[in-house]
Image: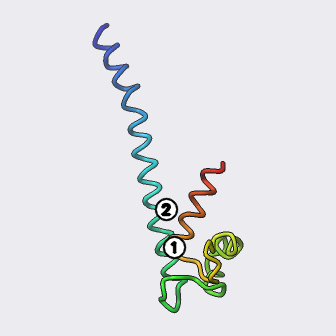
């Protein structure tokens, strides 16, 4: 009985860690996919998307002005990341 109780406690303690690991893995895959899409959209290879290039990423295009934090007419991967983090935080 005691072993079953201890095993149950261990399972309860380890489940959140396993869930966190899965979430971190999904986040890493999503970040890699975003970077690949960004690089593909950045046709001139300058490390930023202008409005025309952003059309290849519809969500970026539709929020271009909000993402473009320094209002230079270009969106960097870092700006997209900051915008996405802010949107996740506001939920």
Q: Nearer the viewer, residue 34 or 45?
A: 45
Label number found at residue 62? none
Q: How many marks?
A: 2
Gap between marks 2 and 1 measured at Cα: 13 Å
15 to 20, vertically: above or below: above
Local packing at callout 2 (Cα closer than 10 Å; few below 14, some 14-19, many 20+) is few
Estimate the x, y position of residue 17 in percent, counting from the top left.
39, 37
- The residue where tag 1 is placed is 77
* Residue ID at (37%, 26%): 11
Q: Residue at x 36, y 31 (%)?
A: 14
Q: As displayed, is residue 26 above or below residue 8?
A: below
- Image height of 45 relative to 91, above or below: below
Secondary element at tag 2:
helix
Location of residue 53 (image quadrant):
bottom right
Q: Quadrant of residue 86?
A: bottom right
Which of disc 1 and disc 2 is earlier in sequence?
2
Residue 45 drawn at (x, y percent): 47, 89
Q: Residue furthest bottom?
A: 44
């Amino acid at each position: 009985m005691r072993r079953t109780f201890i095993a149950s406690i261990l399972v309860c303690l380890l489940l959140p860690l396993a869930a966190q690991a899965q979430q971190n893995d999904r986040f890493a895959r999503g970040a890699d996919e975003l970077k690949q899409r960004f690089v593909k959209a950045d046709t001139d290879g300058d490390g930023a998307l202008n409005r025309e290039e952003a059309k290849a990423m519809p969500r970026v295009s539709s929020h271009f002005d909000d993402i473009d934090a320094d209002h230079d007419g270009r969106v960097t991967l870092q700006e997209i990341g900051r915008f996405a983090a802010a949107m996740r935080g506001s939920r």
